[in-house]
Image (cartoon, grey):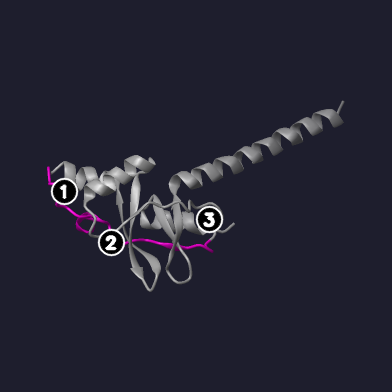
């Protein structure tokens, strides 16, 4: 199954020159723990960075920096790991583990933003699949019990 089928397409975005207070307000408003930083290139939104709620705490709040002066570009993680929308779920999990990330922007063949794949998305999918396997085991057990009566 390609990750395009399970990724969230409702991605909250900011620009590099937005201040971190705006990023924090967007996270709160949309109940998310991250925002993607994008640049427009030839009419395509290209992900260039990410900021998490933890980044805000560690990089801005803890050192008591002025949240009105610090921009998203000042603290964003710019070594952004992305994955193509055609990537399979298992491959995406391996890539996330290898990169040590909980969130992966999903891009199309042109590098344009399609969505975001999160650890939460994967846990939900895998728990549903495990539940279906458990139902299969239960069904097989019942089927065997009936056939032996």
Q: Which residue is at the front of the view, 142 or 124?
A: 124
Q: Closer to us: mark 3 or mark 2? A: 2
Residue placed under numbered mark 2 in the picture: 78
Asked if residue 108 lies left or right of residue 75, the reply is: right
Bounds of the magenta segment: 64-87
> Horizontal placement of 40 versus 9: left or right?
left
Residue placed farthest to the front in the image? 43
The dot on residue 87 is none
Report the front residue among 138 and 28. Answer: 28
Name the residue beneath numbered marker 1. 68
Pointer 3 and pointer 1: residues touching (CB < 8 Å)? no
Q: Is residue 50 above or below residue 63?
A: below
Q: Residues within 10 Å of mark 3 (few under 14, many from 20)?
A: few
x and y percent of residue 88 in the render? 54, 59
User: Label 3, label 2: how many angstroms apart (C-alpha)?
Assistant: 25 Å
Quadrant position of the C terminus in the picture: top right
Spatial separation of the CA atoms under disc 3 and disc 1: 41 Å
* 45 falls in the magenta region: no
Q: Of 13 and 146, which appears nearest the observer? A: 13
Quarter of the figure with the N terminus: bottom right
Tell me if mark 1 has few (under 14), some (14-19) or many (20+) residues whose alpha carbon lies within 10 angstroms of its own: few
The residue drawn where x is 68% and y is 36% is 135
Q: Position of residue 103 (x, y in %)?
A: 40, 52
Magenta-colored segment: predominant secondary structure? loop
Q: Which residue is mark 3?
A: 90
Q: Earlier in the sequence, mark 3 or mark 2?
A: 2
Instruction: First in sequence, mark 3 or 1: give its number.
Output: 1
Which residue is drawn at the image coordinates 38% and 40% (left, top)? 31
Given contact means CB atoms under 8 Å apart, are the residues at marks 1 and 2 in contact? no
């Amino acid at each position: 199954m390609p990750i395009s089928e399970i990724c969230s397409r409702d991605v909250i975005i900011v620009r590099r020159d937005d201040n971190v207070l705006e990023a924090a307000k967007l996270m709160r408003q949309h109940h998310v723990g991250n925002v993607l930083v994008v640049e427009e290139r030839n009419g395509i939104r290209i992900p260039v960075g990410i900021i998490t709620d933890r980044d805000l705490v560690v990089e801005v709040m803890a050192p008591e920096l002025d949240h009105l002066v610090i921009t998203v570009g000042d603290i964003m993680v710019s070594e952004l790991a992305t994955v193509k929308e055609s990537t399979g779920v298992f491959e995406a999990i391996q890539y996330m583990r290898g990169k040590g990330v909980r969130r992966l922007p999903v891009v199309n063949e042109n590098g344009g933003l399609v969505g975001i794949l999160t650890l939460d998305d994967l846990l939900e999918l895998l728990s549903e699949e495990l539940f279906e396997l458990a139902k299969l085991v239960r069904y097989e057990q019942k089927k065997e019990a009936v056939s032996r009566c």
